Image (cartoon, rainbow, N blue to C red):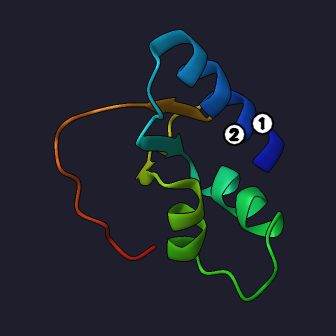
Amino acid sequence: MLSHIYRLIKNFELEHGIHPNLLHLNHIHIEYLKAAFDAGYSLERIMNVLDMELIIEEDIMHPHVAWTTVAQTRIAC
């Protein structure tokens, strides 16, 4: 999952010239992402490493990234 998200980020940067700041995942995606990190990494720490905010959408089939100027508020997952 981490390598897939990394490719999404790089492709977005190449296409738009800016690092995306939103990552859209469902709870299953989140579990796969967390499994790619050591157990000591919280979801908040993972999102800090990725330098993105998390949007949880249970109805999405595939992770995707986006960019927005709207300030986001983090919520505990």
Question: Tag 1: residue type?
Answer: His
Farthest residue, direction left: 70
**Which of the two residues, 16 or 53, is positioned nearer the viewer here?**
16
Q: Residue at x 23, y 54 (%)?
A: 72
The residue under label 2 is: 5
**Which of the two residues, 13 or 31, is positioned nearer the viewer here?**
13
Question: Tag 2: residue type?
Answer: Ile
Residue contact at pointers 2 and 1, CB within 8 angstroms: yes
Q: Is mark 2 on a helix, strand or loop?
A: helix
Residue 43 shows in this picture: yes
In-image side of 76 versus 34 (left or right): left
Q: In which quarter of the image is residue 30?
A: bottom right
Q: Residues within 10 Å of mark 2 (few under 14, many from 20)?
A: some
Farthest residue, direction bottom: 40
Q: Which residue is drawn at 17% across and 50% down?
A: 71
Picture coordinates of residue 24 (x, y %)?
A: 49, 41
Farthest residue, direction front: 17
Residue 62 shows in this picture: no
Q: Residue at x 16, y 41 (%)?
A: 70
Residue 28 sits above or below residue 8 on the image:
below
Q: Residue at x 49, y 55 (%)?
A: 51
> How far apart in space, not on screen, are marks 2 and 1 (Cα)?
4 Å
Q: What element carries label 1?
A: helix
Picture coordinates of residue 43 (x, y %)?
A: 57, 72
Q: In which quarter of the image is residue 3?
A: top right
The residue under label 1 is: 4
Picture coordinates of residue 62 (x, y %)?
A: 65, 30
Residue 47 sits above or below residue 25 on the image:
below
Q: Number of numbered discs present?
A: 2
Q: How crowded is mark 1: few (under 14 residues within 10 Å), some or many (20 or more)?
A: few
